[in-house]
Image: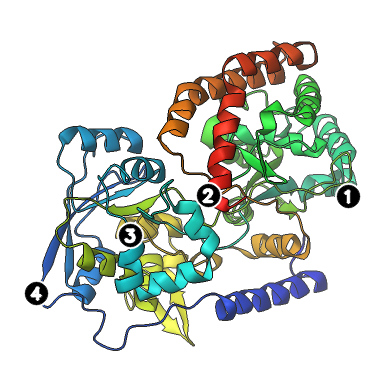
Amino acid sequence: MKLETHQGRKLMRRLTLMAAALATTAFTAPAFADGHLQIVDEPLELTVHLHWPRKQSYDETWPVELAAREMTGIHLKDATAGSNVKDSLEAFNLLLAGGDLPDIVGGHLLKNNVNKYGPEGAFVPLNDLIDEHAPNMKAFFDARPELRQAISAADGNMYYIPYLPDGKYGRAYFIRQDWLDALGLPQPQNVDEVYETLKAFRDGDPNGNGEKDEVPFFARNWEEFPRLVTLWDARTSGSDTYHDFLVQDGKIQHGYAQENYKIGIKNLAKWYAEGLIDPEVFTRGSSSRDYLLGENLGGMTHDWFASTAGYNTKLADTVEGFEFAAMIPPESVSGVRMEEHRRIPIKPDGWAISYQNEHPVETIKYFDFFFTPEGRNLSNFGVEGVHWDMVDGEPIYKPEIVSGERAVNSQMYDIGAQIQRGYWQDYRYEIQWTNEIALAGIALYDEGDYLVDQFLGVAFNEEEQSVFDKYWSSIRTYMLERQQAWLLGTGDVEAEWDDYLADLDRQGFNDVVAVMQSAYDRQYGQ
């Protein structure tokens, strides 16, 4: 996809208009009047547990923290448990084991725990606090009532404020356009053409080195390999979390127990056996994209728009003619173009108020600060005048941020922006460091109706939770073990399918689906 072409310029203009529309039509929270960002007359310290994989504790010296303290008068003091462990759930368990909760508990994968322990009294219900003291959050949830439903516990109360992603598109298909050009091939438009293209990549020496060393399809996350079952109208997840449940016609389902999944896995096992899939797809790990593209070996993948398109710049001087283009989802066997991955509007990450907090009103006002225009800019872009400037009403990064050697999101993590507190992300932060190839790809996806509906999760009551906890972990492990065996050819999905379904039933799969359906009907009013 040559962006200097007339078509490329049209796509860029269309995307610019789309971005402008997003900026003008997105929900805008009411701003505090001048001077009203200050929450307390005298500085107030609140303790916080904030654990997430990239940063295992809260840093009181983050520039974002220092600016928020100055604007609001609230000073968060780090009280993170398990700062020496990577697993946020393990850190949460360590926090509970200590028996002394800080004022604020937040971070990664918070939802299930606060919705479990909130009704038991460990966390403060937020509904009335939001209605009475948090006008910006109230306006947000009034405008998006389905998100209020999605984060509420089984008793109907909200116990945490989530991290709220922005934007629609996440992952996309990318293909080596330069390889297609070398072989005189168009971009594949359906599952059969994908198969033929991958065979051509395997056999046609598109990298021109005289060796049969090309890896036709690779995946940085191995889960993107079985996701190809969507080309046979199957499903692997209903959300942006791998292996999740999904909703079809109001009914809870799991893709790994559906007939089309069997068909898809059978075909993907054939592709793997024929050398069309990276033989190290399950073991190569996160370095696969760097290595296979950098060595001019990788042909096609399914990965994030911005970071994957960035290789066109990164490898421009080292891989001659390198062009990795986004392509729309190929048609499935029934003619459906499906993009299963999209950005979910809520994450199970965020923060909550513990029962030991003696200042719940001031704390909810502090949470609300991050939904004001000033607080939202701070939590997304960093400190105005230091990391970004307001240009014609738009927050624009300083040139040194966008052109730095490190990724913009990594720079933001280092200053306390874009972290997993309860805040509303602003996609304008990402669009500034997304290159033209990714933007053109997003425009292509925006022209089609490829994204599937999302499962936003459920909140169990105590009885439902006990059933889920009893069965689901071992069932999921069994599903993934069989999946990998079938894909690698050490099992036969066709021959084993009936026994597999019977095993799922014996292990409690139908009981899990039943309690999830009960929770879903209660939560979403079905």
Percent across and percent down for residue 29 are 44, 77
Residue that mark 4 sits on: 42
Quarter of image, res 445: bottom right
Reading the chain from its start, which is encountered first: label 2 or label 1? 1
Distance from the alpha carbon under mark 2 to that under mark 3: 17 Å
Judged from the image, the secondary structure of the residue bearing numbered disc 3 is loop
Q: What's the residue type where badge 4 is placed?
A: Glu
- Secondary structure beneath label 2: helix
Q: Looking at numbered disc 3 in the image, what kind of residue is underneath it?
A: Leu
Q: Which residue is mark 1?
A: 186
Front disc: 2 or 1: 2
Q: Is residue 79 left or right of residue 309?
A: left
Spatial CA span between label 2 and label 1 = 47 Å
Give the mark nearest the N terminus, 1 or 4: 4
**Residue 80: quadrant of the picture:** top left
Among numbered discs 4 and 3, the one appearing first in the sequence: 4
Identified at 75% across, 25% down, the residue is: 265
Of the numbered discs 2 and 3, the one sitting upstream in the chain is 3
Q: Is residue 492 visible?
A: no
Query: What residue is pinned by disc 3?
Result: 126
Spatial CA distance of label 1 from label 3 is 54 Å
Q: Quadrant of residue 13?
A: bottom right
Nearer mark to the viewer, of 1 and 3: 3
**Relative depth, front residue between 490 and 140:** 140
Residue 525 lies, in percent from the top left, at 58, 52
> How far, Cα to Cα, is label 1 from label 4?
66 Å
Numbered mark located on residue 523 in the image: 2
Q: Residue at x 62, y 52 (%)?
A: 342
